[in-house]
Image (tube, grey):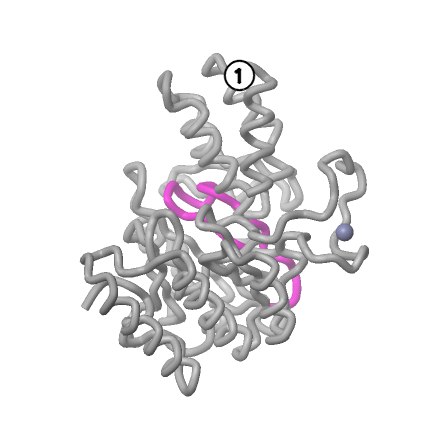
Amino acid sequence: MDTTTGSHPSTPVDGPAHRSAGASIDRFTRRSPRPGHPYRREDHHTTALTHALVAAGRGYAVIPLTRAKLPAVASPHHADQATAPCRGACGQLGHGIHDATADPLAVRRLFAAAPWATAYGIACGVPPYHLIGIDLDTKHGADGLTALRLLAEEHHVALPPTVTVRTPSGGHHLYFSGPPSPPVPNSAGRLAPGIDIRGTGGYLVGPGSHTSRGAYTLTPGTPRTPTPAPPALLHLLTHLPHTTHPHNTRPRPTPHTPSTPAPALLRFVRTAPNGQRNARLFWAACRAHESGLGQEMSTALTTAALHTGLSEREARATIASAGRQ
Ligand SMILES: [Zn+2]
């Protein structure tokens, strides 16, 4: 069949939900047999909601996402409240990852508020799993999978099989459960090039999502729930090195040094050729938001964009629009 998630043999959807999702997919593929493009946005929305409900049923807190992988429900607040951002105390929807919930009715309400959502995010660092996501990228010359293997060898970490999701670009997300504390920080490219870590405040694009780059699918034979992270891996993730070189992973000088913004993302922006400056900045800002680093990286991203010749006003507008997606 095609490459869509709904038809994947190990899709997490089972029971009655599977039958209804399968039926709607079959109906649509009969109407539109174009290979690789059997879906419309409404179908992606339904598929994402169905899978989000399955994930919620397993205890994961979820939010709807746009095709750009950003929180889909618009903020009810204006952008002028940088000092004390509301995290949902106002009772309205639209607080990004703070909206995440495992309550099926609340999940439906979130998706109803964002009919354009075609994907969903799984919140990391929250009960019951205190999920830690390891995002292994294969884009832009990085090879996250090999980098992780090297790191694991070097630090004598045996990586057990766990929930694994394949991304549209051929990368992988590994899901591990963690302890309630210490919190695992988010980072992009800090452990090694091609490895992003999603911890407290971050989220993973869940299997059954469809983004502008394609579908996220569960890897066949994957366990149903995340495997506990081995202690040596946890140690590595809570003592992230400053360097981005996989063979030079000395511990940080002090455990609580302020984190370094992702060098790979900044380099990507700084080296943008004319004609790609805004697009690269937007992409990098989206990645930063996805990793829960949107606020932390906004100044560094602006500086990197100025280096390419963009005006500060342009740069800030692009970064802000990434945050609003
Ligand atoms: Zn609010």
From the top left corner, tell me how far across and down residue 208 is, in percent: 39, 65
> Mark 1 — residue?
306
User: Which span of residues is magenta-colored?
Assistant: 179-198
Quadrant in which the N terminus is drawn: bottom left
Q: What residue is rendered at 37% in x and 19% in y?
A: 275
Q: Quadrant of residue 128?
A: bottom right
Quadrant in which the C terminus is drawn: top right
The answer to whether 302 appears left or right of 26 in the picture is right
From the top left corner, tell me how far across and down residue 176 is, in percent: 48, 67
Q: What residue is rendered at 31% in x and 53% in y?
A: 168
| Residue type beneath disc 1 | Leu
Above-or-below relation of 112 to 272: below
The answer to whether 269 appears left or right of 83 in the picture is left
The answer to whether 225 appears left or right of 289 in the picture is left
* Front one among 284 and 146: 284
Q: Quadrant of residue 43?
A: bottom left
Q: What residue is rendered at 36% in x and 60% in y?
A: 216
Above-or-below relation of 102 to 171: below
**Is residue 57 at all visible to an observer of this figure?**
yes
